[in-house]
Image (spheres, helix red, strand yellow):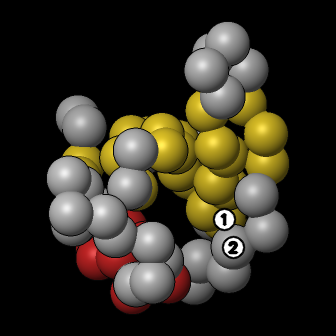
Amino acid sequence: MNRDIVNLDVSGKRFVVERVGERWRACEVRSDGKRSLIGIAIPDSLDESAIAQHFDDVYHEAPTLQRPNVVRLD
């Protein structure tokens, strides 16, 4: 099974996006380290290198002065 993992910081919130088989699955990582699935549409055809830009597009209203961009953590 193909499995890619992308760690992101979106305005101070941490997300993990992983490809499981042919699909992407996204979770918010809470402060206690537990993951919660989130309902964000990620096209199956999206390349792993484009995940951060996709989140930047989706969360375009979330930036703060301290964290203006989606940052890939890995």
Q: Quadrant of residue 32?
A: top right
Task: Indicate the position of residue 5 as horizontal and vertical percent values.
Answer: 44, 41
Q: Quadrant of the C terminus?
A: top left
Q: Amino acid at mark 2?
A: Ile
Q: In the rendered image, which residue does mark 2 sit on? A: 40
Tag in front: 2 or 1: 2
SS for dot 2: loop
Left or right of 9: which side holds 44? right
Towards the viewer: 19 or 12? 12
Task: Indicate the position of residue 17 as horizontal and vertical percent values.
Answer: 53, 50
Q: In the rendered image, which residue does mark 1 sit on? A: 23
Could you tell which of marks 2 and 1 lies nearer the N-terminus? 1
Mark carried by residue 74 = none
Furthest toward the top, the residue is 32
Q: Residue at x 45, y 83 (%)?
A: 61
Task: Indicate the position of residue 12 as horizontal and vertical percent values.
Answer: 40, 44
Q: Residue at x 25, y 37 (%)?
A: 73
Judge whether residue 48 can be spotted in this image. Answer: no
Q: Amino acid at mark 1?
A: Arg
On screen, residue 73 above or below 32 = below
Q: Residue at x 20, y 53 (%)?
A: 66
Towards the viewer: 23 or 39? 39
